[in-house]
Image: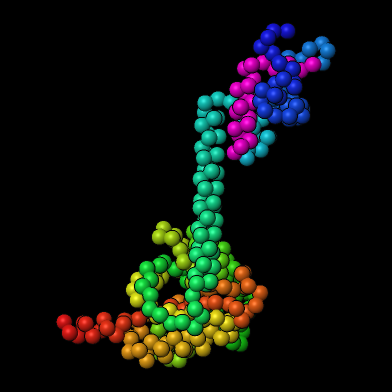
């Protein structure tokens, strides 16, 4: 037997795998030994190392053994190019999925850090950047309202938003400026923040600017009264309501079992009193 042939155990050691792996590959016709001796021993050649390396590379790309066997049996430059393009597309999608997961983890961490640093009940002015939001109308809770249909719809909405890059664990609420003026303090829309390139759902932009922000702690049933309080504070300070109110969950049932500890960030677009005075002076 020439020196360039190896028994199964020796070849397995060169490949860095267990002997059973090579026996399985032989059994399914994926990588058969180049020679079988009269004593039944399997012998692999040096040249088969390249074939094994190809198999190992395709396995790292999660290619099923059946597909690898089919490719190895008909390999050609054209077939390899097709296979590489297929795997490249799979890897690109996996990269996007991992990017979405990383964004979700980053956003969740930021929300938790913010929740642990703010004072519940505090109202302050903040400068917020513009944000693109996918929105869907809130339901009218009345006769004929089908809760199951709505729940399926909002789950589809949230799933679509996540698939298109939203880092939201849940939807937020929007109370329109018109509703605030009419003393209606329940949501008009649900929203999820989106990256710049996401398309396919109704989208609106939360404008950049000054917002009056209230960090409200309590169950969802207390949200409407908190919205009223924020609106009344803005008016009492002499500011002008200049947009809609956005509610964002910082602490909800995903991170806390006690509804009394839920923490909501309520952000209302305003035109500050000082800014109005400056405009008149000019």
Total numbered labels: 0
Q: Quadrant of residue 33?
A: top right
User: Furthest residue to the right?
Assistant: 39
**Residue 214's x, y, as percent?**
46, 81
**Looking at the picture, does residue 182 appear above or below residue 210?**
below
**Residue 263's x, y, as percent?**
54, 77
Which portion, as a residue range, is magenta? 41-61
**Residue 182's x, y, as percent?**
43, 91
Q: Quadrant of residue 176?
A: bottom left
**Residue 180's x, y, as percent?**
43, 87
Any part of residue 278 in sight: yes
Q: Nearer the viewer, residue 3 or 73?
A: 3
Residue 53 located within the stretch drawn in magenta: yes
Task: State the scheme by which the image is colored.
Answer: rainbow
Q: Quadrant of the C terminus?
A: bottom left
User: Furthest residue to the left?
Assistant: 282
Residue at horizontal 57 percent and vertical 73 percent from the top:
251
User: Furthest residue to the top?
Assistant: 1
Image check: 278 left or right of 142? left
Q: Nearer the viewer, residue 217 or 66?
A: 217
**Looking at the picture, does residue 74 appear above or below residue 199?**
above
Residue 206 located within the stretch drawn in magenta: no
Residue at horizontal 55 percent and vertical 81 percent from the top:
217
What predominant SS class does the magenta segment belong to?
helix
Q: Quadrant of the N terminus?
A: top right
Any part of residue 158 in sight: no
Image check: 135 left or right of 24? left
Residue at horizontal 61 percent and vertical 81 percent from the top:
260
Image check: 103 left or right of 233? right
Q: Quadrant of residue 230?
A: bottom left
Residue at horizontal 73 percent and vertical 29 percent from the top:
18
């Amino acid at each position: 037997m020439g020196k360039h042939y190896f028994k199964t155990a020796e070849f397995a050691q060169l490949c860095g795998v267990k002997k059973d792996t090579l026996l399985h590959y032989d059994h399914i016709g994926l990588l058969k030994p180049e020679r079988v001796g009269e004593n039944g021993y399997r012998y692999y050649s040096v040249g088969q190392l390249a074939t094994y390396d190809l198999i190992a590379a395709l396995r790292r790309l999660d290619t099923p053994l059946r597909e690898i066997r089919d490719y190895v049996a008909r390999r050609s430059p054209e077939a390899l190019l097709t296979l590489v393009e297929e795997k490249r597309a799979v890897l690109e999608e996996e990269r996007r999925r991992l990017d979405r997961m990383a964004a979700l983890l980053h956003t969740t961490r930021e929300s938790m850090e913010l929740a642990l640093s703010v004072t519940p009940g505090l109202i302050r002015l903040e400068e917020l950047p513009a944000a693109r939001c996918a929105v869907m109308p809130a339901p009218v809770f009345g006769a004929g309202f089908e809760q199951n249909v709505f729940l399926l719809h909002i789950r589809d909405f949230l799933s679509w938003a996540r698939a298109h890059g939203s880092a939201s664990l849940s939807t937020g609420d929007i109370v329109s400026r018109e509703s605030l003026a009419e003393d209606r303090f329940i949501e008009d829309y649900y929203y999820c923040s989106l990256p710049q390139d996401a398309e396919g759902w109704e989208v609106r932009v939360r404008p950049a600017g000054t917002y009056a922000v209230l960090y409200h702690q309590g169950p969802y049933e207390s949200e409407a009264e908190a919205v009223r309080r924020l609106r009344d504070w803005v008016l009492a300070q002499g500011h002008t309501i200049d947009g809609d109110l956005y509610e964002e969950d910082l602490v909800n049932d995903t991170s806390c079992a006690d509804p009394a500890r839920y923490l909501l960030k309520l952000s209302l677009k305003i035109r500050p009193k000082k800014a109005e005075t400056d405009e008149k002076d000019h």
